[in-house]
Amino acid sequence: MKGPFNPKIQPPPATRRTAIGLILGAPLLGACASVQQTFSQFSNPFSSSEGPAGPPQEGVAVGTGQFKVGLILPLSGAGNAGVAAQSMKNAAEMALAEFQNPNIQLLIKDDGATQQGAGQSTQQALSEGAEIILGPLFALSVPATAQLARTRGVSVIAFSTDSSVAGRGVYLLSFLPESDINRIVDYAAGTGKRSFAALVPDNAYGNVVEAAFKQAVGRKGGRVVAFEKYGADRATPARTVAQSLGSADALLIADDGESVVATADALTAAGANLRNIQLLGTGLWDNPRVFASPSLQGGLYAAPDPSGFRSFSGRYRTRFGGEPVRTATLTYDAVALVAALARTQGPQRFAPETLTNPSGFAGIDGLFRFRSDGTNERGLAVMKVTSGGGTPVAGSPKSFGA
């Protein structure tokens, strides 16, 4: 196993209890459920026009450790952006509290969900000695942070779902559609599926899914017999796909829960018998609307194992008296990761070669690793749609292959 980590390192007992330590030669942070982000605005899943932006929040420092870590969130962002940011801030502070004697200090900055705010927040964190930047959340803010961080040779771990903003020294710790598609296609191919059809939205999310899907099917030696995109009108592309299902083994419908149900209904109206084909989906299927749909029963989708998020949510409720947003685990894992690296990796603690260790890391949502291009790969479970919710049919991997 390559990389600078010693696979025999074990976390101290108190750390193991909070699921933060080292595994497979890489830092273990903690394990997921419904990724219920909508991708209608792909790079900004929390954007909302409801309500004005709040007043800018003053930066705060949390912790007394030696190594300073910038955390940039849209705390005063309009609508649900600010709500999500507060939950992610809480999760970051929770990680700091649960890690035994972390040697880091969080410099928490508000970027107001703007490019200008991201630049100002990053500049402040760097001037205060930040050795690594966590955030921003939104794709439009990441380049401003990246430009300033690169001039200092500082790595960035951002939370955007838009892989186009990843790059040299800028890593995305987020739920990327590519991981879902690769996992579900690999699983389907492993069960003998060879001919695939797909119906996806005509938007940025659909474009990412299309590229990943066609690559994944080709990599497995399969073929795409039908691929259609839909906008406001689902009926026409649904008819086209329905007519091709006789030569397909599996059908991918990639969208959020409500849209998946509407798409399945459009296919049924077009004459498709969805019980005669294996339905495939992404983590966005982890949604009550999907579980309640008769048409989607038995469908398979890729998602993190739900047990980790359930445990995390329980601890969060106890500490803060409310429910975390789904992406709160990202800041928890990011803070736990940098705390573990600060403890074990010496001067190379936040270097690119440390962050891209091929063994990867284990967090609340299972295994993940950063690629050199800044995107990530996640070890996901395969879940089956039942009326009672998602049921695991294949567990998440315990390690990454070579």
Image (cartoon, rainbow, N blue to C red):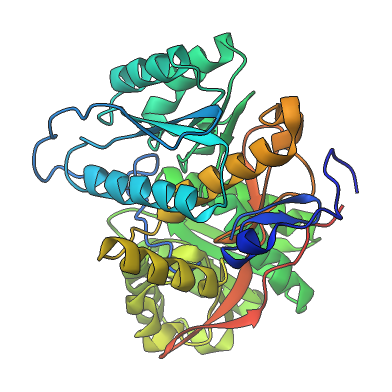
Q: Kindly tell me whether residue 14 is visible in this rendering.
A: yes
In front: 397, or 12? Answer: 12
Q: Is residue 73 left or right of residue 17?
A: left
Q: Residue at x 34, y 78 (%)?
A: 288
In front: 299, or 121? Answer: 121
Q: Is residue 170 above or below residue 187?
A: above
Q: Is residue 385 above or below residue 313?
A: below
In the displayed image of the protein, which residue is found farthest to the top?
Answer: 151
Q: Where in the figure is residue 28, as x and y percent of width and height?
A: 67, 55
In front: 207, or 345? Answer: 345
Residue 339, quarter of picture: top right
Q: Residue at x 62, y 74 (%)?
A: 382
Q: Where in the figure is residue 49, as x and y percent of width and height?
A: 14, 42
Q: Residue at x 50, y 30 (%)?
A: 69
Q: Where in the figure is residue 58, as x and y percent of width and height?
A: 23, 26
Q: Is residue 222 left or right of residue 373?
A: right
Q: Kindly tell me whether residue 202 is visible in this rendering.
A: no
In the displayed image of the protein, which residue is found farthest to the right?
Answer: 1
